[in-house]
Amino acid sequence: MDKVAGQQLVPTPTRQRVALAEQRVELLQRLHSIAASTDGDRLERLLAQWDESLLAGCADAESLRPLWEQARVTVPVVARLRQAIAEDDSAVIERLLLLVHDPGTELLLPGDLAAPIQQFRQRQFAARQARRQGLLQALVDNDGTTFRTLFDGALVGELAASLPTAAACWIA
């Protein structure tokens, strides 16, 4: 009863601010705990817990905001990358890896993606080497059909740069 009577002495805007502060404190404690963890899913958990309507204008949330911004960008990319790896969609994987390694984005990938990404890169390297070998063999065999089938402008340019005397013969 005394608590109820005391609340009536406090103006409504102040009571509302106190209630907001209590909600924020609870949420901020959870968010700081998540941010301090080293779990691979901490960005997903931070993104799931973040309540922008509650934390907007909250000075105490500002130290967490950069991590939240990172999570907003990283989590969807990681989800799409996992899907592309599961579907073995090389074009999407390649595009997402370019985004991840772009100096402007600097996305941090979970450690469990390291092995699948390494395997993807090894497969891509092996395929490129096979195309390179096929192009060289087509040139040696004077096989225009195979050369046109395997043609990759960047790869031919790379071959020409690595074999300047042979390239001069091909052009002449």
Image (cartoon, rainbow, N blue to C red):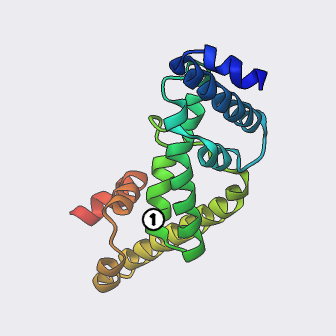
Label 1 residue SS: helix
Residue 53 pos. (x, y %): 49, 37
Whether residue 76 sits left or right of residue 35 in the image: it is: left
Instruction: Give the residue at x 57% y 43%.
Output: 71
Q: Residue furthest left?
A: 172
Identify residue type, mark 1: Val
Residue 131 pos. (x, y %): 46, 73
Quadrant where the N terminus lies? top right
Q: Nearer the viewer, residue 151 or 159?
A: 151
- Residue 62 can be seen in this image: no
For disc 1, the marked residue is: 92
Say few, some or many: other residues with alpha carbon within 10 Å of mark 1 (under 14 / 14 to 19 / 20 or more): some
Instruction: Give the residue at x 54% y 66%.
Output: 124
Quadrant where the C terminus lies? bottom left
Query: Looking at the image, is 29 positioned above or below residue 109?
Result: above
Instruction: Give the residue at x 48% y 38%.
Output: 105
